[in-house]
Image (tube, rainbow, N blue to C red):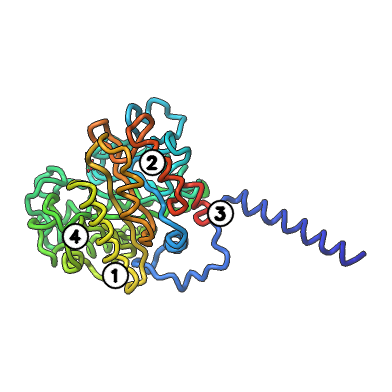
Amino acid sequence: MKFTYDLKYIAQRLVILVILIQLSGCKSSSGIDFKTIKVSDAGATKATKLLYHDIRKLSKRGIAFGHQDATAYGIGWKHEEQPNLLRSDIKGVAGDFPAVHGYDIGHIELGRPHNLDTVSFDVMKDHIQKLYEKGAIITMSWHLNNPVTDGSSWDKTSAVPAILEDGEQREKYVLWVKRLADFFNSLKDEKGDLIPVVFRPFHEMNGSWFWWGGDNVSPEDYKQLWKDTQQLLKQNNVHSLLFAYSPNTFSCEEEFDKYYPGDEFVDILGVDIYNHSGNEAFTKDVNQNLEMIRKKALLADKPFALTETGNNNFGEDPYWWTQTLYPGIKKSGAAWVLLWRNARSSHYFATYPGEISQKDFKEFAELEEILFLDEVEDITN
Ligand code: BMA
């Protein structure tokens, strides 16, 4: 019968089309009207806009789990020891990779081969590519050196005025941003397309521990630095970034707003909150800060995240995940929560195999609201 033949023919063509799409490895963007997606960079690539779209979409499903340097090293291992293996402490405990992967590009500005925590930029690039292909979201912070003294990020010597236009160290900063730009422009997927990144520069600016924050800078200069850096990146042809603004724990809205460069310069709102002052205070801070940000994000029509967190009371709390962190983030609407790095047994922020809270972490990971790589890839791939 003609009708049956047509259906069979159409079905065959559809199967071929699906196979072709899968083989091409392309991230699915069908039905998305890119003109309606507005991000801080008007010239942002499609993949960057798609990332923004995906982040918003996944925030409606749950909270993506993130970890800093997840595949670069963990407790008792370093990637270099088994270079062919993509390993992660989180995968070791929960059976899956984090959905969000954080990296720090501090020292890229110096043209060095390793970041400030000895992670090789080549390894970082390779892992970013592999993880992005699997559907992971990539975010980057930048613990850059003090451009005036060449000390670290924690060198509080005033430096922002010196790198703004006409400042004494402007030329140096222009070169630093060029190196940063070259790195972003070298992040390519298998097809050679740029990999979009959530960039989170000059974070925790309401504290005074970095040269770009608190007592070490005026809010006006901070905002200028933010905009200037965006401008310099554009001049270097970088169009693959979403910008996240993330102060440290804040006590009122004014504190969050103090350094905020403006809605048109920011894509994602965030906050960094660590468990410094006891579990109860932590849960309360997370609740209150995320609620304040949620309201702002709603007004500004932007997604938001808990951009850094972790339990500083290493090895002392077997139930931190379900009893302290989860009550803080539950139903907050945050797109992700990123745990800081597992550097060593006296400086780790997520769990690892054999660690005291691993059982609780597994329970936390199994919560419907908490999303790992397998649970987001239908959106992000
Ligand atoms: C801090 C610590 C440091 C590290 C820096 C940048 O919180 O973990 O050891 O150098 O972040 O990753």
Q: Is there any visible trace of residue 140 in the rendered image? A: yes
Q: State if disc 4 and disc 2 touch (CB < 8 Å).
A: no
Residue 150, horizontal then vertical, whole percent: 13, 44
As shown in the figure, which amino acid type bears the numbered disc 3?
Answer: Cys
As shown in the figure, which amino acid type bears the numbered disc 4?
Answer: Phe
Left or right of residue 373, residue 7 in this image:
right
Q: Looking at the picture, does residue 347 appear above or below residue 369?
A: above
Q: Closer to us: mark 3 or mark 1?
A: 1
Residue 298, horizontal then vertical, whole percent: 34, 71
- The residue carrying mark 1 is 296
Residue at 34%, 33% (x, y): give it. Answer: 74
Q: Is there any visible trace of residue 113 in the rendered image? A: no
Pointer 2 or 4: first along the chain: 4
Determine the secondary structure under disc 2: helix
- Tag 3: Cα neighbours inside 10 Å, few (<14), some, or many (≥20)? some
- The residue carrying mark 4 is 250
- The residue carrying mark 2 is 361
- Tag 1: Cα neighbours inside 10 Å, few (<14), some, or many (≥20)? some
Mark 2 vs ligand 1: CB below 8 Å: no
Pointer 2 or 3: first along the chain: 3
The answer to which quarter of the image holds residue 168 is bottom left
